[in-house]
Image: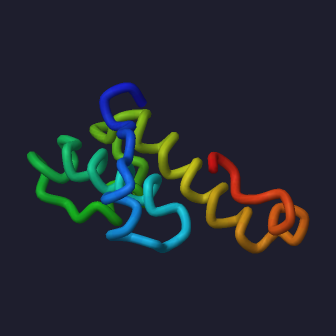
Amino acid sequence: MSGYARYYSEADQIEDKRPCAGLRADLRDCIMQSDCVKIHKKSPKECLATKDLTVPDECHQLRQAFFECKRSLLDNRQRFRGRKGY
């Protein structure tokens, strides 16, 4: 994840106030830079759904982290403790 993880300033946080916005942006950037999208001209959704080998492992890890973040929004225990990674 070294090439795709970013640090966000306050200005970035103001733009997108949705939960898990940072992970969403990192996942989007990772998928858009993959060979699956650039060379094979598939949609990002197709690339993740088919587990294409041209998609870096970092993208799949970001997808899992994004899923965990979204799931923590629905978990009542996590609602009191706060979201993961924040």
Which residue is rendered at x = 22% and y = 48% of the image? Answer: 36
Q: Is residue 42 left or right of residue 27?
A: left
Quarter of the picture holding the N terminus: top left
Q: Position of residue 68 (x, y in %)?
A: 66, 55
Residue that lies at the very extreme toward the front in this rendered image: 10
> In the rendered view, would you say 52 is above or below 18?
above
Residue that lies at the very extreme toward the top in this rendered image: 2
Which residue is rendered at x = 55% and y = 68% of the image? Answer: 19
Q: How is the image coloured?
A: rainbow
**Closest to the observer: 32 or 74?**
74
**Closest to the observer: 10 or 78?**
10
Q: Quadrant of residue 4?
A: top left
Q: In which quarter of the image is residue 47?
A: bottom left
Q: In this view, does 25 lie to the left or right of 86?
A: left
**Closest to the observer: 37 or 64?**
64
Q: Where is residue 69 in the image (x, y as percent from the top left)?
A: 63, 58
Q: In this view, does 32 lie to the left or right of 26?
A: left
Q: Position of residue 31 (x, y in %)?
A: 29, 50
Which residue is rendered at x = 53% and y = 61% of the image? Answer: 20
* Number of marks in picture: 0
Q: Position of residue 26 (x, y in %)?
A: 37, 49
Which residue is rendered at x = 76% and y = 59% of the image? Answer: 82
